[in-house]
Image (tube, rainbow, N blue to C red):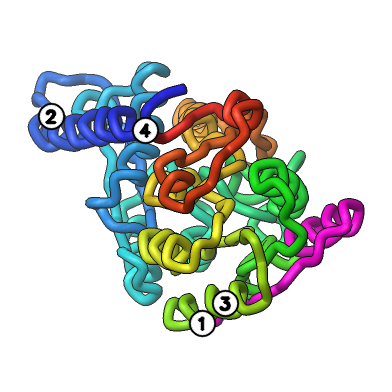
């Protein structure tokens, strides 16, 4: 069990150090003979977001472990669209115009702007749902185009998250699901949750989220329906407002399980899903293969092998909730 604050701060310092090193080492010594490769990074988040900093630190460290050094044989160009869809499209076009050898898309929302900007620049996605459905790969085994990366299935995780929530909230018979019907994977995850609920005699209260302004009324509706806990499925907008979500869950005394670790580190009760660290390590390995001459079309899309359970014990105490000791022992990380 690792305290998350120290871990996140350490990764943040690593990332900032890497960026500082990149700036200090540029331009390269004229005597350097090694060819410099260019990597683009497109993210919809903010540069001061500690979580995305920690993920990118893992990616850069992974490249370094494979022989790449920023300022010697590697240059990394970052674009941070900060939740602005128009800026995301502009940033994607700018990155492609730089002629990168490979570009990292940090989430599903970054993929389509990059696809619209280029059908030839190699793209690696770090974590996205259903790249086949998005039309960026022909199949996971044979991508066939300029995209490859790491994917996972929300539908398979929906039922598992419900089961974990029920194990932690003993005696719950009504569970709310807060979700965005237009976000890839959410509808499938809801069906998985319903299927799991039916085998355990649990009533599911479905509440669609229309936007951030709809959050408080969604929690109001869940409590009014007497839900004892909630499965919260974040889209990109909700992820960017995860602290507000955590505040509302606490205000409404509603324990929640989430799709991404930062939601729990910022106050949600639990997370279960693929390891972000593994996803970015594997993305670095794929980028390395492309930098060394492989084509994305020939690199199968990979799926996670490591899944994590994270529990915010501080939030549990604030909710007046006692998590069974046997359940805590199952956690990969407990935030205290």
Label 4 crowd (10 A; few <14 / some 14-19 / many >=20): some
Q: Nearer the viewer, residue 66 or 10?
A: 10
User: Could you tell me how far apart the alpha carbons at marks 1 and 2 are, in whole angstroms?
Assistant: 55 Å
| Disc with the residue nearer the chain's start (2 vs 4) | 4
Mark 4, secondary structure of its residue: helix
| Disc with the residue nearer the chain's start (3 vs 2) | 2
Quadrant placement of the C terminus: top left
Q: Nearer the viewer, residue 163 or 158?
A: 163
Q: Position of residue 333 (x, y in %)?
A: 49, 29
Q: Which residues are magenta?
A: 189-210
User: Is 193 one of the magenta-colored residues?
Assistant: yes
Q: Position of residue 37 (x, y in %)?
A: 33, 34
Q: Which mark is residue 209?
A: 3
Q: Nearer the viewer, mark 2 or mark 4?
A: 4
Find disc 4 in the rendering and name its residue.
4
User: Could you tell me how far apart the alpha carbons at marks 2 and 4 are, in whole angstroms?
Assistant: 37 Å
Q: Nearer the viewer, residue 78 or 327?
A: 327
Find disc 2 in the rendering and name its residue.
28
Residue at (61, 69) in percent of width and height: 178
Q: Quadrant of residue 192?
A: bottom right
Q: Is residue 42 visible?
A: yes
Q: Nearer the viewer, mark 1 or mark 2?
A: 1
Label 3 crowd (10 A; few <14 / some 14-19 / many >=20): many
Q: Position of residue 78 (x, y in %)?
A: 28, 49
Q: Nearer the viewer, mark 4 or mark 1?
A: 1
Residue at (40, 42) in percent of width and height: 314
Find disc 1 in the rendering and name its residue.
217
Mark 3, secondary structure of its residue: loop
| Disc with the residue nearer the chain's start (1 vs 2) | 2
């Amino acid at each position: 069990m690792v305290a998350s604050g120290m871990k996140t701060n350490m990764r943040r310092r690593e990332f900032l150090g890497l960026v500082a090193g990149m700036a200090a080492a540029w331009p390269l010594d004229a005597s350097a003979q090694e060819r410099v490769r260019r990597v683009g990074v497109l993210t919809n988040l903010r540069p001061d977001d500690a979580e995305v900093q920690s993920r990118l630190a893992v990616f850069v460290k992974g490249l370094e472990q494979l022989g790449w050094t920023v300022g010697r044989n590697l240059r990394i160009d970052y674009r941070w669209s900060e939740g602005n869809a128009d800026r995301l499209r502009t940033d994607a076009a700018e990155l492609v115009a730089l002629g990168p050898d490979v570009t990292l898309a940090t989430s599903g929302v970054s993929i389509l702007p990059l696809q619209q900007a280029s059908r030839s620049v190699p793209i690696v996605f770090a974590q996205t749902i259903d790249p086949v459905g998005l039309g960026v790969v022909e199949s996971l085994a044979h991508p066939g185009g300029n995209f490859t990366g790491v994917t996972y299935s929300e539908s398979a995780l929906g039922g598992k998250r419900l089961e974990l929530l029920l194990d932690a909230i003993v005696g719950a018979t009504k569970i709310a699901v807060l979700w965005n019907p237009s976000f890839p994977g959410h509808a499938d995850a809801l069906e998985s949750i319903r299927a799991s609920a039916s085998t355990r005699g649990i009533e599911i209260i479905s509440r669609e989220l229309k936007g951030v302004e709809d959050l408080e009324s969604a929690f109001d509706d869940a409590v009014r329906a007497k839900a004892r806990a909630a499965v919260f499925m974040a889209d990109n907008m909700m992820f960017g407002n995860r602290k507000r979500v955590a505040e509302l869950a606490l205000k409404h005394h509603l324990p929640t399980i989430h799709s991404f670790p930062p939601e729990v580190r910022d106050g949600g009760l639990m997370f279960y899903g693929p390891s972000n660290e593994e996803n970015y390590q594997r993305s670095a390995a794929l980028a390395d293969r492309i930098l060394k001459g492989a084509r994305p079309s020939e690199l199968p899309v990979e799926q996670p092998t490591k899944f994590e359970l994270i529990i915010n014990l501080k939030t549990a105490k604030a909710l007046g909730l006692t998590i069974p000791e046997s359940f805590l022992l199952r956690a990969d990380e407990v935030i205290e």
